[in-house]
Amino acid sequence: MRCAIAHYHELALKGHNRDYFEQRLIMNIRTALRDLGIRQVQNLHSRVRIDLPPDTDVDLVRDRLGRVCGIANFSLGRVIPLRLGNPDLEALSAAAVAELEAKSFQTFRVTAKRADKRLTLTSMDIEKSVGATICEKTGKKVSLKHPDLTVYIELLTKEAFCSAEKVEGPGGMPTGVSGNVACLISGGIDSPVAAYRLIKRGCQASFIHFSGRPLVSRASEEKVRDLVQTLTHYQYHSRLYVVPFGEIQREIVLSAPAPFRIVLYRRTMIRITEELARRERCWALVTGDSLGQVASQTPQNICAIEDAAELPILRPLIGMDKREIIDEARRLGTYETSIEPDQDCCKLFVPPHPSTKTRLDDVLRIEHTLDVAGMVKRGLEKAELTELSFPTSTTWLDCSR
């Protein structure tokens, strides 16, 4: 029988809460694979076994498991029943040779581990026996230090598992164990990476995008929906609020000095996001700020913007440089979408010389001349909600709020 064995690391350290985290991981694995006809997902000690039907698309399973947060690594292979408490070495060796048929290699090694130390055969006994058979059947050589390929054998309680690959997973925590957060998403490179980092730590992310509409087209909104759909592959269900922000920006432009506009935009966005976050029962806001990257992300401006919030603001990228963020966006699969051109509200009415050392007193004095509560209310009333899901087909639900 073909199956996959998924391993986790951090979950094993959760003490009395370990069962809850393991059950959440298993639920997420079932969700990720539910449209592939996979029903058997079993919790073993420090590992999860997934039975694969004969006609399963293994490449699709590999891709899906590679996105399940909480999995440290996983292997796809075959299971062989134990006989009288020990593996049938002939059957196990045959399974190992079968796993190597489609592989290209010159040297190999066999690595065996026993989950149950009461088994008579030791790991070394199994490695020698299976390795000798592979040498005989394939003519390949053993290399213990620098093999082209490693055959992994795990001796479980009632069966042995054999695989010729080990795939890295995202690691982290199962999505859904760390509460809800509200992520501001602009359509650029940074904010999807920031959201992913919180998803990987077990948070369920809701997304808020500020569009320049009605002063610009819906291009940025379509782009953000694509980005959120990619992130939904990691958390399976997402809610995206799109807030038309162009008129609010224009109101700020007509009443506020040019150097302070960016900070005023961001403070208004934070207030609107916070109200939407409360609807979603979020405990924090998330931004893609990286210290010093743009004018709104200087130390003084970050402090001036954060003053507008009551909920905590999390900045998972704050110490990363642009190259690190781009590399992670490529791994995540959002980079190519993020660099597509669009009409972002952040590019509207940008002053030529924005303030980089904004004093909070100056911002509060200017806000006294603005109808801040009215702008927030209008933003909330015009917000549109879209729900996305994975792996089932996506249904777009646009709801005026």
Image: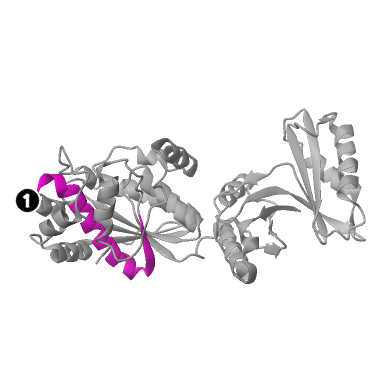
Please tell me which residue lies in front, 180 or 342.
180
Q: Is residue 200 inside the magenta stretch?
A: no
Kind of residue at disc 1? Leu
Using the rendered view, name the quadrant where residue 110 is placed.
top right
Q: Is residue 123 above or below residue 16?
A: above
Query: Left or right of 294: which side holds 234?
Result: right
Tell me where residue 292 sits by quadrant.
top left
- Residue at 10 percent across and 49 percent down: it is 253
Point 46% across, 61% down: residue: 203
Height in image: 71 above or below 152?
below
Looking at the rendered structure, the secondary structure element under dot 1 is: helix
Left or right: residue 181 versus residue 219 is right
Q: Which residue is mark 1?
A: 254
Instruction: Give percent across and percent down for residue 141.
Output: 83, 29
Tell me if residue 267 is in the magenta stretch.
Answer: yes
Q: Which residue sits at x=69%, y=52%?
A: 4
Is residue 21 visible to the viewer in this orientation of the structure? yes
259 relative to 135 in the view: left or right:
left
Q: Which residues are magenta?
A: 257-286
